[in-house]
Image (spheres, rainbow, N blue to C red):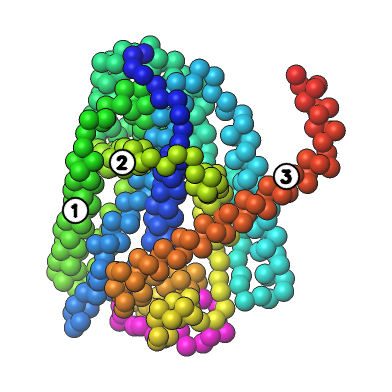
């Protein structure tokens, strides 16, 4: 291969991991924990109550961007490695997955057993049945170790670029992508492309002479296109709703393109990658320490425990003083009338999306406070993930101290 390979790994890439995880958490919050009935509610008398949802559409894009950034970083650092260690990161991720599942299972038992003001559930097999991105991530690394790196190493700079262009073009055509979807390998193909792009950036630094302002304009153009697409979808949904009297709700105008091969998402992710990689942060211990916990943070907030959590009492925005009035939700048993009732029983169990009540904060208080509220939630999720990481490390140290001689004996037998 041609090109010079950068050897230093500074905290700017660790910051990029944090940025990617923040984007993924934000996406999951709007995906799983917002009451879209509140936004989609439409009736002939009052019209639509779509408010401030352009921002929600932009947040919707962060899931794909975050996933892409993680794979870009992986390709960037592994492309030049002749011997990729798959076992170590694989064991670490399984270790975190199972220990966290056990911890959350214990908490679920305690909350249910003693009727505490919080209730949830967990699944000890979550490490195998859920958390799809973890297995996907490891599979990309394994494929790179045994196949992809050797293939890319045999390409000249020109052939490498042609490979990226050909794969990008193929994935961009619906017919070809549908074939991959039917074969259930579409995500794998996207991962291979993104990994290869990260490797190409590492080896040849193609964006070195591109101005930062150009990259920022690309980002702004991407988000502008997302907003326009949302508005077009909204107009179509509203038109169809009023034309069809049998429709109780307008269709959601949001576009969720997670696991999409869109060239626009690739350009957006590469622009963010390039901008953050240019930051001069040196070796920042705090950033590195937080970055090391990102996968545990992911495991926590995407667990069956977090998704199924319920609280007894007043919803969170009211507790924080963000909303003065008691929070409301749309009645699911009578959506046709668009009934909205107050949750005035503080002792009732409330579903998580209603407890967090992100929807009403955006609707009643606007975008700025809505984003600030989401930022608070993201910080809290990160803090809880960091605490889980610290506790798991403590458990590992205890186990190692208790069974050190056994581990040493097993290691010698296997060498």
Q: Look at mark 2 in the image and give the residue it sits on.
A: 275
Residue at disc 2, secondary structure: helix
Quadrant where the image shows the N terminus: top left
Above or below, comparing residue 406 to residue 393 in the picture: above
Task: Name the residue carrying label 1.
Answer: 224
Circles 2, 3 touching at the beta carbon (< 8 Å): no
Q: Are marks 3 and 1 in contact (CB under 8 Å)?
A: no
Q: Which residue is mark 3?
A: 396
What is the distance, in whole Å, between disc 2 and disc 3 at their CAs?
Answer: 37 Å
Mark 1 vs 2, N-terminal side: 1
> CA separation, marks 1 and 2?
19 Å
Q: Residue at x 57, y 28 (%)?
A: 86
- Between residue 103 and residue 308, name the one nearer to us: 103
Q: Mark 2: few, some, or many residues within 10 Å (few <14, many ≥20)? A: some
**Visible residue check, residue 48:** yes
Other residues around mark 1 within 10 Å, as few (<14) / some (14–19) / many (≥20): some
Q: Measuring from the top left, give residue 124's x and y in whole percent.
A: 66, 51
Please say whether residue 338 is one of the residues in the magenta stretch: yes
Relative horizontal placement of residue 146, taking residue 373 as reference (left or right) = right
Q: Which residues are magenta?
A: 336-350
Point out residue 155 in the picture as x, y percentages from the top left corner: 34, 13
Disc 3, SS: helix
**For residue 148, above or below residue 174:** above
Based on the picture, tell me whether residue 282 belongs to the magenta stretch. Answer: no
Residue 167: percent from the left, percent from the top?
29, 26
The spot of residue 371 in percent (x, y) is 35, 65
Query: Label 3, label 1: how many angstroms apart (C-alpha)?
Result: 47 Å
Q: Residue at x 24, y 62 (%)?
A: 54
């Amino acid at each position: 291969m041609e090109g010079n390979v950068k050897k230093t790994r500074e905290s700017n890439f660790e910051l990029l991991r944090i940025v990617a995880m923040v984007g993924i958490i934000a996406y999951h919050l709007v995906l799983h924990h917002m009451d879209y009935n509140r936004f989609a509610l439409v009736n002939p008398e009052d019209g639509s109550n779509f408010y401030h949802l352009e921002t929600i559409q932009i947040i919707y894009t962060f899931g794909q961007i975050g996933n892409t950034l993680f794979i870009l970083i992986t390709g960037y650092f592994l492309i030049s490695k002749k011997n990729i260690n798959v076992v170590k990161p694989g064991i670490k991720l399984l270790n975190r997955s199972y220990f966290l599942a056990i911890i959350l299972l214990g908490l679920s038992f305690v909350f249910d057993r003693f009727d505490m003001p919080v209730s949830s559930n967990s699944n000890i097999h979550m490490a195998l049945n859920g958390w799809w991105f973890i297995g996907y991530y490891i599979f990309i690394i394994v494929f790179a170790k045994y196949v992809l790196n050797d293939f890319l190493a045999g390409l000249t700079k020109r052939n490498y670029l042609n490979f990226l262009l050909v794969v990008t073009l193929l994935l961009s055509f619906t017919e070809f992508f549908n074939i991959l979807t039917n074969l259930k390998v579409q995500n794998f193909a996207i991962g291979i492309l993104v990994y290869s792009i990260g490797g190409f950036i590492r080896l040849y630094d193609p964006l070195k002479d591109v101005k930062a302002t150009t990259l920022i304009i690309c980002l702004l153009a991407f988000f502008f296109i997302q907003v326009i697409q949302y508005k077009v979808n909204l107009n179509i949904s509203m038109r169809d709703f009023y034309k069809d009297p049998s429709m109780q709700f307008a269709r959601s105008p949001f576009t969720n393109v997670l696991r999409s091969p869109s060239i626009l998402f690739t350009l957006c992710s590469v622009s963010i990658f390039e901008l953050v990689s240019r930051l001069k942060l040196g070796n920042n211990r705090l950033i590195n320490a937080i970055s090391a916990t990102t996968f545990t943070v992911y495991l926590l907030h995407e667990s069956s425990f977090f998704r199924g959590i319920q609280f007894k009492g007043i919803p969170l925005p009211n507790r924080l003083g963000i909303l003065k009035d008691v929070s409301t939700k749309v009645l699911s048993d009578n959506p046709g009338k668009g009934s909205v009732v107050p949750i005035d029983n503080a002792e009732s169990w409330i579903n998580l999306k209603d407890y967090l009540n992100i929807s009403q904060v955006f609707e009643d208080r606007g975008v700025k406070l809505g984003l600030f509220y989401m930022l608070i939630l993201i910080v809290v999720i990160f803090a809880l993930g960091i605490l889980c990481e610290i506790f798991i490390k403590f458990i590992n140290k205890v186990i190692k101290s208790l069974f050190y001689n056994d581990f040493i004996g097993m290691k010698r037998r296997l060498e």
